[in-house]
Image (spheres, grey):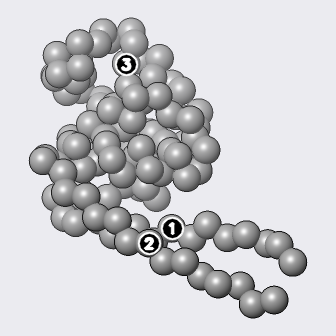
Amino acid sequence: MEKKTIVQRISKKDEDVLSHAQRYYYILSAINGLQLTKREIQLTAFVAVRGNISYSNIRKEFCSMYSSSSPTINNIISKLKKKGVLVKISSKIKVNPIISLDFNKDVILEIKLLVDVD
């Protein structure tokens, strides 16, 4: 029996770069079963857009933007580092380069969900 391939194209326009990054990391989390929380996705997107989360002024900006606290950020950073989402590069905490994109540009994802049935 011949397998049929289904192609579905979905397009979504985001209102800003941060929303664009959040949508990408939400999809990445869902596809890879990372089970990231909303706040973890927000922090990951924020770090990707800002470049790092190592400086106090950047942390304060995140806390202000998302009504969060510094200890909460530290806990999230620790969890994301364990999952390999955030990494320490040259004493700065950044998004893992494997999943870091330039969110000022359009992102086209090709996702293949394969099934192995006879």
In the picture, measured across the screen, residue 83 lies left or right of residue 27, that is right
The answer to whether the residue labelled 1 contacts the one labelled 3, judged by CB atoms less than 8 Å apart, is no
Residue 65 visible in the displayed image: yes
For label 2, the SS is loop
Q: How far is the residue under mark 1 from the one under mark 3?
A: 31 Å
In the displayed structure, would residue 4 be above or below residue 61? below
Per the image, the residue denoted by label 1 is: 111
For discs 1 and 2, the disc positioned in front in the rendered view: 2
Residue drawn where x is 58% and y is 40% of the image: 34
Q: Locate residue 42, reporting x and y percent.
A: 32, 32
Per the image, the residue denoted by label 2 is: 8
Quadrant of image for the C terminus: bottom right
Amino acid type at circle 3 is: Ile
Other-residue count near label 3 (Cα within 10 Å), few / some / many at <14 / 14–19 / ≥20: some
Quadrant of image for the N terminus: bottom right
For the residue pair 6 and 31, the one nearer the viewer reads as 6
In the displayed structure, would residue 87 be above or below residue 43? below
For the residue pair 115 and 110, the one nearer the viewer reads as 115
Q: Locate residue 38, reporting x and y percent.
A: 40, 29
In the picture, measured across the screen, residue 44 lies left or right of residue 20, that is right
Q: How far is the residue under mark 2 from the one under mark 3?
A: 37 Å
Asked where in the image residue 51 lies, by quadrant, the reply is top left
Report the residue that reaches farthest toward the right.
118
Per the image, the residue denoted by label 3 is: 73
N-terminal of the two: label 1 or label 2? Answer: 2
Report the residue that reaches farthest toward the bottom.
2
For label 1, the SS is loop
Other-residue count near label 2 (Cα within 10 Å), few / some / many at <14 / 14–19 / ≥20: few
N-terminal of the two: label 2 or label 3? Answer: 2
Amino acid type at circle 2 is: Gln
Residue drawn where x is 36% and y is 51% of the image: 24
